[in-house]
Image: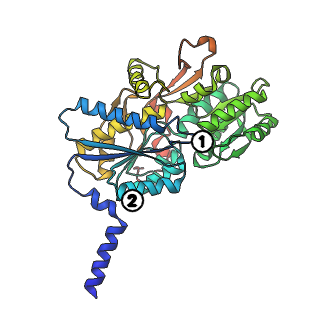
Amino acid sequence: MKRQLAALSLITAIVTAPGAAFAQAAFDGTVKVGVLNDQSSLYADVTGQGSVIAARMALEDYMKANPNSKLKVEIIFADHQNKPDIGSNLARQWYDRDGVDMILDVPNSAVALAVSEVTKQANKVHVNGSAGTARLTGDACSPNTVHWTFDNFALANGTGRAIVQTGGDTWYFITADYAFGHDLEAQTSAVVKAGGGKVIGGVRAPLNTPDFSSFLLQAQSSKAHVIGLANAGGDTINSIKQAAEFGIVSAGQRLAGLLVFVTDVHALGLQTAQGLQFTEAFYWDMNDDTRAWTKRFVEKMNGKQYPTMNHAGTYGGMLHFLKAIDAAQTRDGAKIVAKMKELPTDDMTFGKGSVREDGRHIHPMYLWEVKKPSESKGAWDYYKLVKTIPADQAWRPLDQGNCPFVKK
């Protein structure tokens, strides 16, 4: 009986923690990366196949720069459909059955938080390039997760502060009703209040809402000077288009797009989007490196679209992961992430940077304004730089995030 119980305990341990056995296997250079994102809905343009291509570009560039590397890397992808249960189940399947070492991209904060937890349990790696929640480096931080491109603190700190400083002292929020929107509204509200402004109301809209008319009418009747759009992707496009149809901006209220992508501006057109100010980590026309990288990306996308900052973050995060796993020579996820924090970052999309103790990738952020149609000189020439936000000012201070493993 004792032997049977011991055998049963061993089987239970293997079943409940299958990722651990795989993580301890000898490292032979074989690496599998899963790009997990929205392939079919409102975030497909800002992530989708563009992120798969960006990951492949990073692999090409790493192997070209390191011809003696013994890495043998496979990249797969899947659609999480913006559902945490689907995202977490895919993550478990990839880690436990399919031998995936790292999950990349993962827009939608609710999905990202779920995947980060599964990654920690399996002792693998999650490099998030596309979710906004600052909890990934806060109370929900993990020694197995790196948050690369942006977060809601940086967006609020950039856009919210700039608008308050230019007279936007009363705010009404239209917020995507899930983890990302709630966090972005909270972060921006804190910045508004700290700057002497006031939040006078708000409404929460279901994700992927086609009709924002009732929400916009409530915002209009509030008489707030600023309508803060705590949403993204297709929801941002629809809310801005419909605000223009209602004549809200011409009536004296301002729209604050708290997360805007170049693909959103392209869909809106400069006539509708002109004058919008927002914070982003990357724009294709920043310098020679970003222009050269974008040219390759656009060619691989068959000329269909230019890269978003999420695509750039997927590229940078993938490149640094390859550098770290090659140096660490292990499948132990926590050790790989520790190596990512130890090594400096440097890539064509973000330049030089670092990964902080809480997993936050540190780089400058930028406040942009959409050009007038008369200012644009060609295809996808949409932004003009308002302000560079230095890396030491862009991100929430390390001691304010409440990450459990950060030294006090």
Q: Amino acid at mark 1?
A: Leu
Q: Give residue 186's position: percent from left, percent from top.
A: 62, 44
Q: Give residue 41's position: percent from left, percent from top.
A: 56, 42
Can you tell which quarter of the image residue 296 is in?
Answer: top left
Q: Residue furthest front?
A: 302
Number of marks present in the image shown: 2
In this rendering, which labeled residue sits more in front, label 2 or label 1?
Answer: 2
On screen, residue 265 versus residue 320, left or right, reads: right
Q: Which residue is mark 2?
A: 121
Q: Which residue is mark 1?
A: 184
Please report whichever mark, 2 or 1, sits nearer to the chain's N-terminal start.
Answer: 2
Residue 211 numbered tag:
none
Can you tell which quarter of the image residue 104 is in?
Answer: top left
- The residue under the point 23% across, 57% down is 25
- Regarding residue 248, the answer to whether it shows in the image is no
What element does badge 1 sit on? Answer: helix
- The residue under the point 63% across, 26% down is 268
Q: Are marks 2 and 1 in contact (CB under 8 Å)?
A: no
